[in-house]
Structures are given as structure tokens and as C-alpha cells.
């Protein structure tokens, strides 16, 4: 689960935010990680308490057309994330081979070696977890080394963590941070991964014990991922903020910029950067493949052999990524711009994972005694409203402003936005369920109306009003 917070999409968001906005968006990175932690805890709670993961429950709880839309949106989010992850690995291969491995070949290598890593699962989930821990260790060592080489300003970092601000030229970077940190497919993934442990869900004390340890584990993992993301943002804030060419730095050319500025060290910083990026890309592609399996199996309930499902989910990501690599192989700026907007795509897609999760963990019929309390509901739904607000702000400021001269584009965007908003409202109200939010609101209104009638009877003594109603 923690790898989802350390993939090349996160690294892209971190370095662009640091180079463009300096230390000023660190507070957003911190609070996005905190929000992500709460969401991951809820995903784990859903998986442990019900014995089913989020995609399976969506299949059971929503009408056919709704779960097909959710499945499609989730697949789009997975493909978007996988494009970033595979491209990140391909860039690392290109750097480490001194350009002898082009992007498209790096993509194919990543697609093939993903199967080799997944083969480790046959030797037990602990072996696979150890491999992930190794990747995180490589990332931590690489970016900590770079942090020491660049020596960022500690006071500026503290101010960036404590003082909220969003520079006018960094609105899309701020949205990208939320989209890159809280990734929709990671919610589906975590609700499934917690079932790798044998837990007797019929025993409440065993479920509570499991949830307690999962929460501790998630907190530690995300704290480590936050420190790594913070290091990357600080490195590029110190090295390039306010400097010429800062707006042109992205995942494809970041190593070259670092080498030009800090290339006199004991070991070329370009290769340190590439090693960390390779670890992030290789590990995150495996999480994307796992998520694809769970999502396809959960939403569609297809009786497909596991290796066939792996081939399908891998091909769904690799094919568009090869196309992207061929198109943008000679245009680093366009490739970085694409990756930036893929982060925004994750933020736009997030409600389609977050809202079903919140509806399910708030439902007593689904969760039983492990339904979330009122305070957790308020905080979790506030996060959902915040994400939706960020998305609408992005739509109104960043997108509409760039399409203001195209009437047809505005019409299409308006229709798409209306459909997007209507579907989200449907998910929130959950009208297909007898105990959904829509039924709750109707019952609440009915109780208020009944109370008003009783008060009217008491005031007038006219029971005919009540009997007629």
C-alpha cells in the first residue's frame, strides 16, 4: 500500500512542486498524506470487517449500470497511474544505460520483469513484502543521499510545513499533489491486501486486534513515504526554485538538471536519482498489476485464471504506455506535461473510489458493529467534499480558462461536468439501497413532518388533521 504513495507520479508531483513553488506546498503534502492515512484505514476496516474487498462489495451493492461505470472509471485511473509508473522505470533504464535503452524498450522491459516479480508470490506473501521493503529502502537511501548533497534550508522547510499557502502559478501543482498522494486504485488495493492474513471475522476481538495492527502498520508506512516525498520536494526547492528553467524540470530531465548543478560529488547524482526512480517504478508497476486483478475480479466476477488476468491487466497498461513512449520519446517537456495531467486525472477519478468506500463503511448493514462512528464520518466526508471542491476549482480556473475561446469545447466540458456531478450525487445519495443516504433523508423528513403534525394536534386538539394524513 505504501508504494502507492511513492510511485513516479508522486515523484513527478514532488519535484515539479518544489521547483515551481519552493517549500510552500509542503503543508499540502503533509495533510494529503494524513488524509490518505485515514482513507487507507477505512479501506482496511472494510476489508477486514466484511471479508470482501471494495470492488466485490460494489458489485453486490450497486445496480449493474453503476458498477460498470465505477469499473470503467477505476480502469482509467489504473491505466493513468500505470503509464506514469512504467514511463518512470523506462526513464531510469534510459539514464542508467547512458541512452542506449530508448523509452519504448524500457517500457517493454518493465512489462516483462513485472511478471518475474509477481512469480515471487508463489513463495509466500512475506517474500513479496520483503521485496517491497527492499525497494522502499533503496528509495530512502537514494533520496536521503541527494538530500545531503543539496542541503535544503531547514527553516524554510518548517515554514512550508506549518504555513498554508498556494502560489498563483502552482494551482495545478497543488491539485496534482492531492491526486498523486491519494490515488483511487490504492483504495481498492488496500481493502484486498489486508485479506492476505487469516482473520476469523466471526470473532470481534480478533477483528479489532487486526484493525489495530493494520492502523499502526499503515501509519508507519505512510510516515516513511511522507519523509521520502518531503526529501524530493525539498531537494528541488533548494536546487531550482526561482532559477531559470525551473518550470521546464520534469521526470524525464530531472537527473540531468541535478547533474549539472551537483555533479561534482563522489558518485554521480544522476545515477543516484535514476536508481531511486527505478526502485519506485519497478515496485509501483507491481501494485498496479495487483490492483487490476482485484478490480477486474471484483467488479466483473469473471472466472478467469490468475495468469490470464495478469496478462490482460498488464497489456491494458503496457500498450497505451508504449504508444505514449513512442509519441513523446523526443519531447521531454510534453512527456512531463502529460505526467502532470495524469496526476490531475487521479484527483478527478478519486471520488469514484472514495464515495463508495465512505457509503459502505457508514452502513450498519454492511459493517455491523464495525461501522464508523459519527466523528469519523464527519471527518471522512469532509475530506470527500474537499477533494470535490479542489476538482471543481481546477475545472473552473485551469481548464475553462484555457478553453474560453472554444465554444464547442466549453459545451462538451459543460455536459461532461454535469454528468460527472450527477453521478457523484447518485453515489452519495445511494438511492438503490433501502438503507442508503437517500432513504435516511426521506425517513428523516418523514419524522420531522410527523412531529409537526403531532405538535399541531396538541395545539389545536383537532385529530382530524392527523387521521387525514
Image (tube, helix red, strand yellow):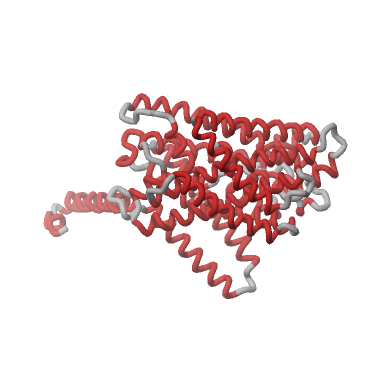
For image coordinates 50% across by 43% down, the residue present is 290
The outermost residue toward the right is 264
Quarter of the figure with the C terminus: bottom left
Image coords of residue 369 (percent x, y): 32, 33
Q: Is residue 450 visible?
A: yes
- Name the foreground residue: 162 vs 451: 162
- Residue 375: percent from left, percent from top: 43, 37
Asked where in the image residue 261 lies, by quadrant, the reply is: top right
Q: Is residue 138 left or right of residue 468?
A: right
Residue in front for this viewpoint, 331 or 14? 331
Q: Is residue 159 in view?
A: no
- In the visual, does 353 lie left or right of 395? left
Which residue is located at x 72 percent, y 38 percent?
A: 275
Q: How many marks?
A: 0
Residue 337, image x and y in percent? 68, 56
Residue 379 shown left or right of residue 162 in the figure: left
Coordinates of residue 237 in the picture (x, y in percent):
75, 43
The answer to whether 301 is drawn above or below residue 272 in the figure is below
Q: Residue at x 62, y 30 (%)?
A: 134
Q: Nearer the viewer, residue 298 or 228?
A: 298
Residue at horizontal 58 percent and vertical 60 percent from the top? 395
Amino acid at each position: 500500500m505504501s508504494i502507492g504513495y511513492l510511485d513516479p507520479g508522486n515523484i513527478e508531483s514532488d519535484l515539479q512542486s518544489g521547483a515551481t513553488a519552493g517549500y510552500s506546498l509542503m503543508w499540502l503534502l503533509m495533510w494529503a498524506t494524513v488524509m490518505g492515512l485515514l482513507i487507507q484505514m477505512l479501506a482496511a476496516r472494510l476489508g477486514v470487517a466484511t471479508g470482501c474487498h471494495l470492488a466485490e462489495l460494489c458489485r453486490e451493492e450497486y445496480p449493474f449500470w453503476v458498477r460498470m461505470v465505477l469499473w470503467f472509471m477505476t480502469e482509467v485511473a489504473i491505466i493513468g497511474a500505470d503509464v506514469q509508473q512504467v514511463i518512470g522505470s523506462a526513464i531510469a533504464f534510459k539514464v542508467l544505460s547512458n541512452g542506449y535503452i530508448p523509452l519504448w524498450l524500457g517500457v517493454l522491459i518493465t512489462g516483462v520483469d513485472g511478471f518475474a516479480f509477481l512469480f515471487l508470490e508463489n513463495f509466500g506473501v512475506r517474500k513479496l513484502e520483503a521485496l517491497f521493503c527492499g525497494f522502499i529502502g533503496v528509495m530512502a537511501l537514494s533520496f536521503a543521499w541527494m538530500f545531503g548533497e543539496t542541503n535544503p534550508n531547514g527553516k524554510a522547510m518548517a515554514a512550508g510545513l506549518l504555513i498554508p499557502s498556494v502560489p498563483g502559478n502552482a494551482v495545478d501543482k497543488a491539485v496534482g499533489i492531492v491526486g498523486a498522494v491519494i490515488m483511487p486504485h490504492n483504495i481498492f488495493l488496500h481493502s484486498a491486501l489486508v485479506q492476505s492474513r487469516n482473520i476469523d471475522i466471526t470473532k470481534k476481538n480478533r477483528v479489532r486486534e487486526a484493525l489495530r495492527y493494520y492502523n499502526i502498520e499503515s501509519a508507519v508506512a505512510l510516515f516513511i513515504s511522507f519523509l521520502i516525498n518531503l526529501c524530493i520536494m525539498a531537494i528541488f526547492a533548494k536546487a531550482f526554485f526561482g532559477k531559470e528553467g525551473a518550470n521546464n524540470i520534469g521526470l524525464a530531465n530531472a537527473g540531468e538538471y541535478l547533474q549539472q548543478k551537483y555533479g561534482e560529488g563522489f558518485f554521480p547524482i544522476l545515477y543516484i536519482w535514476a536508481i531511486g526512480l527505478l526502485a519506485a517504478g519497478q515496485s509501483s508497476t507491481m501494485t498496479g498489476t495487483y490492483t487490476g486483478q482485484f478490480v477486474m475480479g471484483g467488479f466483473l466476477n469473471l472466472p478467469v485464471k490468475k495468469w490470464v488476468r495478469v496478462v490482460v491487466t498488464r497489456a491494458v497498461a503496457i500498450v497505451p504506455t508504449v504508444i505514449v513512449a513512442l509519441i513523446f520519446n523526443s519531447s521531454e517537456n510534453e512527456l512531463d506535461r502529460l505526467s502532470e495531467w495524469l496526476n490531475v486525472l487521479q484527483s478527478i477519478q478519486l471520488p469514484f473510489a472514495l464515495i463508495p468506500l465512505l457509503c459502505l463503511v457508514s452502513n450498519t448493514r454492511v459493517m455491523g458493529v464495525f461501522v464508523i462512528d459519527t466523528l469519523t464520518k464527519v471527518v471522512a466526508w469532509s475530506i470527500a467534499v474537499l477533494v470535490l471542491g479542489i476538482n471543481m476549482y481546477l475545472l473552473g480556473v485551469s481548464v475553462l480558462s484555457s478553453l474560453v475561446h472554444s465554444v464547442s469545447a466549453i459545451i462538451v466540458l459543460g455536459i461532461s461536468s454535469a454528468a460527472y456531478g450527477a453521478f457523484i450525487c447518485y453515489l452519495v445519495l445511494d438511492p438503490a439501497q433501502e438503507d442508503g443516504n437517500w432513504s435516511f433523508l426521506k425517513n428523516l423528513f418523514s419524522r420531522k413532518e410527523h412531529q409537526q403534525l403531532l405538535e399541531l394536534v396538541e395545539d389545536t386538539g383537532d385529530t382530524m388533521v392527523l387521521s387525514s394524513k
